[in-house]
Amino acid sequence: MPNMAMQKNPMPSQQPEVRNQNFMEVALGYSAETAIDEAKRCLNCKNHPCVSGCPVRIHIPEFIQKMAQGDFEAAYQIIAESSSLPAVCGRVCPQESQCESKCVRGIKGEPVGIGRLERFAADWHNAHCTDRPVKPASNGHKVAVIGSGPSGLTCAGDLAKKGYDVTVFEALHLAGGVLVYGIPEFRLPKAIVQKEIDTLADLGVKIETNVVIGKTITIDELMQEYGFEAVFIGSGAGLPKFMNIPGENLKGVYSANEFLTRINLMKAYKPNSDTPIQHGKHVAVVGGGNVAMDAARCAKRLGADVTIIYRRTEVELPARREEVEHAMEEGIVFKFLTNPLEIIGDERGWASAVRCQEMELGEPDASGRRRPVPKEGSEFSLDLDCVIMALGTSPNPLIKSTTEGLETQKWGGIIAEEETGLTSRTGVYAGGDAVTGAATVILAMGAGKNAAAAIDDYLSK
């Protein structure tokens, strides 16, 4: 019998006053009984609208039906047919705006907890299955993948399953891209990411770290000297943006990229870490996206009083609602309709305050959100000792500047066909944040999946 409960089963989690003092995972996951109960809320609709909301086209009703029967391994295998990173997606995908937004159960209540079920299936597989994937027979073709973030790993995994000899080139010392340097441990444990990467390695994917494409080696050299017949660029968007206001060069001012990389990849939050980071007492985070929430919640866990400064209202916040609610529960203060004008330094050259101006909403801008405009005579200052700028990122220009004939947008994004990822260079494909600018993990995965299919079509002719 279907479970006709109007609300999805709640996700167990650490209490706010406990979790804001540690870096352990906030969400604790469903039990087997809860997962089965939640799966029974699925009506197995004839047209499967949820699948249309998934960028990697997971067969959602099929895996949920297996969950409802208690066959968790079968559920995982169905997910793995479409996704190379099930345990990651179950944690960080914005399901509420994708697959779950299409669920018919959401018309009169809450949608089925698709993401929570995906997480459970992946975690159950990782905990209980000891069989390692079998490396497919080689088809004789070599493909290079630049970047080991979600788009690169997805492209590599899909090609490896088809027998391609795939090598992933990663600029940092550890594979995973934004999954390891950007997303905090309390949202996505690094052991989960490593497990997914190990699965790809079992399929034959080789990963070369500490290789900066465009510096260590170029795309032209990969293709002309090393025998790679196609290249996928999934190098992400790691170049931080700033407001260009006075004081941004003061000590104690970070980009969110640097702050999160020091914490997540270089383990600065650990008491015995050699990685330097400022343990500010009063921290301001400028921005309203998921990265801003991650930076603010990390700073809170380092012992700071944290204020998020955002120039629009709570309604316009681009961050996931769940992340905003978690931040508020953890004691982070939000100052909406507020815009920084200047970061003020002390006599030592350290940030000591931020001068702000209150805003009000005017007409919608190009994004469709109402444009914030200054409110006359509303300036004020906030005392602080650390500022984190979480204003978005753009692609690093290194690959563009070292690859002849690769066309890019004015803002730096690589120009690539939406359906295939094909760039202006024959045999060179691109996807994810390197093309679109900063977006979600699952959209990057979708781009990697599309490019893998296109590369297979190109090389198998």
Image: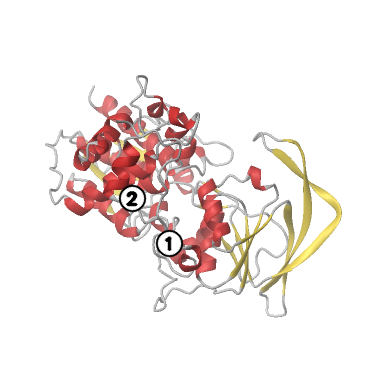
**Between 141 and 441, the one nearer to me in the picture:** 441
Asked which quadrant contains residue 340, the reply is bottom right
Seen in the image, is 184 located left or right of residue 75? right
Q: Amino acid at mark 2?
A: Tyr
Name the residue rendered at 28%, 54% in the picture: 208
Q: Position of residue 143 (x, y in %)?
A: 27, 39
Q: Position of residue 380 (x, y in %)?
A: 80, 63
Q: Position of residue 458 (x, y in %)?
A: 29, 26
Q: Is residue 328 visible?
A: yes
Q: Position of residue 66 (x, y in %)?
A: 24, 35
Q: Amino acid at mark 1?
A: Gln
Against 57, residue 278 (above or below) is below
Seen in the image, is 38 located left or right of residue 68? right
Against 436, residue 357 (above or below) is below
Q: Is residue 153 visible?
A: no
**Between 247 and 179, the one nearer to me in the picture:** 179
Asked which quadrant contains residue 145, the reply is top left
Name the residue rendered at 26%, 41% in the picture: 157
**Between 306 and 41, the one nearer to me in the picture:** 41
Q: Residues within 10 Å of mark 1 (few under 14, many from 20)?
A: few
- Residue projecting furthest to the top: 46
Quarter placement of the C terminus: top left
**Between 34 and 276, the one nearer to me in the picture:** 34
Q: What SS does tag 1 mark? A: loop
The residue under label 1 is 14
Alpha carbon distance from label 2 to label 1:
13 Å
Quarter placement of the N terminus: top left
Against 29, residue 249 (above or below) is below
The residue under label 2 is 30
